[in-house]
Image (spheres, rainbow, N blue to C red):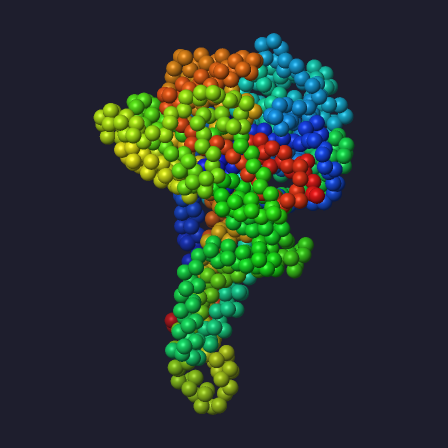
Amino acid sequence: MKAAFRSRTFAPIFHVAVFGLALVASPWVTTPAIAQKQGGSITVGLESDIPGFDPLKVGVYDTAALTAASALFDTLTTLDDKGMAQPELALSWSHSEDFKTWTFKLRPGVKFHDGTPFNAEAYKANYERQKDPANKCRCAFYISNVISVEAPDELTLVYNLKDPSVNYPALVSYANQNAAVHSPTAWKAKGDEYNRNPVGTGPYILKSWSAGDRMVLERNPNYWNKGRPYLDRLVLKPLPDAQSRFASLQSGEADVIWDDEYDADNIQKAQKDPKLKVHTYVGSGAQVYAFNTKVAPFDDVRVRQALVMALDRKKMSQAITNGLALPATNPFGDGSWVKCKDDGALPFDIEKAKALIKDYGKPVDFKMIVTATPRGRTVGQVLQQFWKQAGANMEIEQIDQATVVPRAFMRQFQLTPWRIVDLADPDVQMFANFRTGSPVALANYSNPDLDALLDRARVTPDKAKRTEDYCAISRHVNQQAIWFWTFQNTYYALSTAKLKGLPKMYSGVIDVSGAWLE
Amino acid sequence: MLGFVARRLLYLVPVLLAVSLLTFLIASLLPGDLAYTILGDQATPEKVAALRHDMGLDQPIWWRYLSWLGNVLQGDFGRSFRTGQTVLQAVTERLPVSLELMLLAQLGALTIGIPLAIACAVRSGSAFDRFMTGSAFSMLSVPAFLSAILLIYLFAVELRWLPATGYIPFHEDPVGNLRCFLLPALTLALGEWPVLMRVLRSDMIQTLQEDYIAMARAKGLKPSRILLVHALKPSSLTLVTVTGINIGRLIGGTVIVESIFALPGIGRLLLSAIFTRDLIILQGVVLIVALGYVMINFIVDLLYAVLDPRIRHGHA
């Protein structure tokens, strides 16, 4: 469900961060301590080709597409650097008592790049196009909580939700496949070609795009936010190879590049180079793994606990990422507002792990799915060694990236990798991952207490009370060891020291739409 | 000669049919269901079944092959489910990049390989010959991804003479275009010249022992004329074959090299089609590449006939 599958652990080339929050930098957020300079052009090195922007075609935007989308499109809200929703296309919002109805007041006078007006009808058309069953959009899944969107007048938008959402405005804050607002006139006129000729209201307009090579975006002279953006031109290039991508930054062909902790050598090189700057953001969520608790040996809690207690995450981080990866003890992470005094994490204790396995009495042999990528294999081999020391035999089953999801959905695994992505609110993913009956409740685990906590946490507006519930959920999951977490989601961008104005990389999105050159 | 061409062309038909069948089978037998890939996180069994039906995936494989082949024969290679581009659009956009890369790489390999081969053949057994043969061996064992990174480090990061990555179309800026092809073409050429050089060298050594060469020497012809005119042409038969076959290796090489140097060619199109299970693009591109490969070898056959009259007349 919410698991953004093609992420770091899984494939170097496709980074689909399904949920996450790109901060479309806004004047209410940035403190204008330094005068921003107008003009200039930058080149952004992305990790993959962008397939397009029509939600009906691409289904989900990957991180490369999100970088472009945050320049081409606006969204209702944007996140400030504390993770709170701030106005963008919506000026204000209010909710019903039960948090099932959200009303947004829209910004007047905004126009799409093709000159047509942005209004509530246009927004509604976007929503309905995604939701229409006849369109079979993969994107419809992510708005399954929305019953309808209404446009009672030109500048009022009403969201009717199936389940309460106490933090809804934070979930429409970045230009993903659902929240980016496209021009209805443009998609109707261009048909199949719209995918590669997107039209939004954003600070940049698509000038040219040659497949697999470069996308050139130019400053929108009629942007509603006067004085924005600063740069005249953005050039986005896919640079799939990590080494040559970094070389392009060093040689000045790229001004900012995407990177991740598996490229630790280059990140550490950049940290020492005064001409370069390392941007990093520790988000919420984590790299996670799910046990199938319906099959032996994982139907026994002792085995699950033993395997988790045999993990030395620090050593693992050292081995895989030169120590850059931050160990995770709960599914929320440093980037989340959920902070737990006690998250119930099992400690690293190899002796206890051995004892638990001995206590179990039978040999512990199992297969673990890893993706057939260098990273997948490395992680698998490290885990294998840890578990061997505890007396368990893990066999690595390398399968292709694209087959991990169906295998997980059909529960054809004993232990599978998964991912909880950076998102402004924990509800969506926690509910999906642990509530009985959810298609992504991969552990096949069902517990009435856990269900009750999940049901309550999503409808509690009070942050302190919600935090308590989510910490109780973390304790339950950690103690029962149905899932475990290895590392937090840490995102990286490397740039020249001259590039300023990069906001926090919510969900790993490098948003250059508010950047300038010193 | 015409009969020869017709015969060769006729041989191509079964080859191409076999290639199309293999391509289709390989793409269909890749693990991972296309319906699951498209539906992703919302792949409920009902939706998967409905989509499989829509896409005809529930039909028997022979039927799907035949209908695909039928469309291909009418020039319709299909449309990517991800980008909405047709296979022909995607290929025509990217083919010029790969062709230029392969052409420059092959030229580079020949430019390095032929003079060295001649020089070695003339002094066969000398220290120079032994040194070059040895270096050729070691160059052969350096993988493209390593030489690419070393070249980038030297010429782009340290010296800053050439760009590390990127592509500029020829019609926009011919010089810039050549500059961005120099390193990738050199990377491929470095892996190719040793083969060409060794093949030509050994053929040349044989040719130089022939009586007519001794005759030419006795007549007092200039050594350079003997080498380049009398010895090179008859020695280059294997070289031509190897050059033709090497195109196949080069196509493989472009997959790696285009990714490292961020060139928007066929190799990268293929790679991303595999990773995203874009089977329509995958089948189409492989088939078109195979067509190209078969055609090149057909041309090589014709070149044989030009180089060696005995083949033309069916005596060889």
Taking the spot 43% from the left edge, 67% from the top edge, the residue there is B136
x%, y% of residue B193? 47, 65
From the image, which quarter does the C terminus of chain B lie in? bottom left
Nearest the camera: A472 or A79? A472
When asked about the image quadrant of residue A483, the answer is top left
Q: For residue B157, say whether it is visible.
A: yes
Q: Nearer the viewer, residue B132 or B192?
A: B132
Judged from this view, the residue extending furthest toward the top is A97
Above or below: residue B34 compared with residue B194 = above
Q: Residue at the spot x=57%, y=13% of the render?
A: A461
Q: Is residue B290 left or right of residue B159?
A: left
B69 and B214: which one is in front?
B214
Could you say where residue B132 lies in the image, as x and y percent from the top left? 43, 71
Going by the picture, which residue comes out furthest to the left? A361
- Residue at horizontal 51%, vertical 82%? B224
In the image, residue B173 above or below residue A336: below
The residue nearer to you, when weighing B125 against B264, is B125
- The answer to whether residue B85 shows anywhere in this view is no
